[in-house]
Amino acid sequence: MGDRGALEPALYCYHCEFCLSGHHNVCANIRFLSNPNHPGFFRELVNLPSPTFFPSRQLSFAEAALSEPLAIAVHSLRLTSIRLGETVAVIGAGPSGF
C-alpha cells in the first residue's frame, strides 16, 4: 500500500479463451470502470486485481493519471499512417475519441 503507479481501467475475466491466450484486450467478458454499474476512480479507495496495477515511482500522480489516455493515443498513431502536415478528425463518444 502506498505505491505510486497507474491502473488499467479495464476489468478482464482471466478465464475466456482470449484471456488465457494473453489477449486480454479482446476479453469476451471485459468491463470498464466508470460505466453503469462499475464505479470509476473518482473515489477514495478502489479494489482491483493486482495485474491492473503498474507501479512507477518515477511518475507524478498527474503523469500516472494520463498514462492510459496517452497509451491509447500512441497505439492509435501506430495503427495509422498519418504524416506530418496531414489533417485528421477524431470522432467518438468517449474522452479518448472512440
Image (cartoon, grey):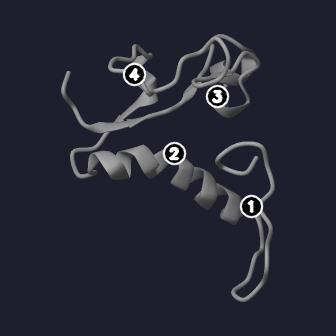
Labelled pair 2, 4 in contact (Cβ < 8 Å): no
Which residue does the numbered mark 4 point to in the structure image?
A: 43
Q: Which mark is residue 68?
A: 2
Q: Earlier in the sequence, mark 2 or mark 1?
A: 2
Which residue does the numbered mark 1 point to in the structure image?
A: 79
Q: Distance between the Cα atoms at labels 2 and 4? A: 18 Å
Please identify the quadrant where the N terminus is shown: top left
In this view, 35 is above or below 78: above
Which residue does the numbered mark 3 point to in the structure image?
A: 24
Q: Distance between the Cα atoms at labels 2 and 1? A: 17 Å
Q: Distance between the Cα atoms at labels 1 and 4? A: 34 Å
Mark in the foreground, 2 or 1: 2
Name the residue rendered at 21%, 45% in the picture: 57
Q: Nearer the viewer, residue 85 or 43?
A: 43
Q: Secondary structure at mark 3?
A: helix
Mark in the foreground, 3 or 4: 4
Residue 54 x/y as whole percent: 37, 36
